Amino acid sequence: MRAAKTRVSKTVTFWFAIAVALCSCIVASEAKYRTDKNRFGVYRQQVIVDPSGHGNFTTIQEAVDSVRQNNKHWFFINVRPGIYREKIKIPYEKPYIVLKGAGKRRTRVEWDDHFSIAQSPTFVSLADNTVVKGMTFANSYNRPRKGKNKNPRVPAVAAMIGGDKSAFYSVGFDGLQDTLWDSEGRHYFHRCTIQGAVDFIFGTGQSYYEDCVVHVLGGEIEPGVAGYITAQGRTDPKDANGFVFNNCLVYGTGMAFLGRPWRGYSRVIFYQSNLTDVVVPEGWDAWNFVGHENQLTYGEYNCYGSGSKTPRRVKWEKKLNGDTVRGFADLNNFINHDGWLDDLPIPS
Ligand SMILES: *[C@@H]1O[C@H](CO)[C@@H](O)[C@H](O)[C@H]1NC(C)=O
Ligand SMILES: *[C@@H]1O[C@H](CO)[C@@H](O)[C@H](O)[C@H]1NC(C)=O
């Protein structure tokens, strides 16, 4: 009896072990499969946009329209050099689109709407898993002509980014007021250039700007009046969103505050960045939250350059301790807990 029981349990153990081995094998190959699909695009589709008609489409929007709803595989849209006079919208139900231009200066998308913040963006992406590389989105409504700004300055958005897990490599954002609406979700910007004068990086995104250029325009607003680089919109102390600038260059022809709070718990950190003399000595402005400055998380850490001298900074700027700074400044910690960024197909 006892011997038989042992044999039964041994047999069970044996088959159980086989099953476990099989399962982990399947899980492993499934994981590998998934990675391959992302990294090397086994299911990758590809189309070319060429304004002269030698591609699949002549406008970027037509290429986006050709992507199936609830698309599940990376879809590459290669955009040849040119100036594209169109507005682009990547709708919510079209994730996994990769837009690849020929370079910030060679592939340019322009429009000039300014009716409202929501209506004005030249480029809108609402889908998760959007990747853009090597192109510029411009809202030209307030572009100065011959040094003069003909139109009155109004919010005129170049790009609105509302999806989660979206990344931008060598992308230009050109505008004057409200240039980049970093609206919602986790975003990574690498080697991007963002240009403007007033609130030109704004929204409620949870975003990491790395090796980017922040170009402060001057002259377009009244002489001697400083603009604002960021207007971050965090509303609650428990919210994960905020903007981190790591190893960026802040320069230009105007003067600007590093930020002012669009909402009451605004959070912006400049880390290891070159802040040139375009940054006003006070650094930050409390805007509509005077008296509630303690709610704001504005900080600078290890910055350098002539605009980084802080003796005249507002007293309520946060003095960050090492742990807090590491929490923000570490890319993985701040936006990449689940490794989404490592799975993106970065176009070469
Ligand atoms: C795009 O154009 C190329 C070259 O003409 C063609 O081979 C390909 O099938 C087209 N792709 C689509 C999705 O139309
Ligand atoms: C900061 O940037 C300015 C403008 O590009 C440059 O002239 C300066 O050398 C930079 N500062 C440092 C310390 O790299």
Image: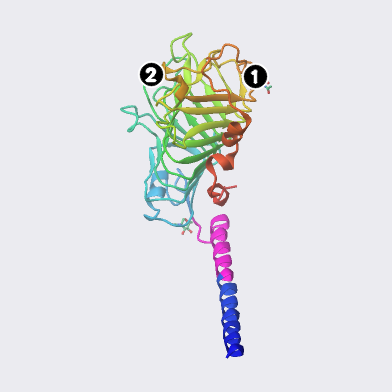
SS majority, magenta: helix
Which quarter of the figure has residue 262?
Answer: top left
Examine the rendering and report whether any part of residue 316 can be seen: yes
Label 2 C-beta lies within 8 Å of the nearest ligand 2 atom = no
Label 1 C-beta lies within 8 Å of the nearest ligand 2 atom = yes
Q: Where is residue 260 in the image (x, y as percent from the top left)?
A: 45, 21
| Label at residue 204 | none
Name the residue that disc number 2 marks. Answer: 288
Examine the rendering and report whether any part of residue 108 can be seen: no
Name the residue that disc number 1 marks. Answer: 305
The N terminus, quarter of image: bottom right
Which quarter of the figure has residue 332?
Answer: top right
Would residue 271 appear left or right of 45 to someone viewing this image? Answer: right
Q: In the structure shown, which secondary structural element does the residue marked by tag 1 occupy?
A: loop
The quadrant of the rendered image in which ligand 2 is seen is top right
Q: Where is residue 299 in the image (x, y as percent from the top left)?
A: 55, 24
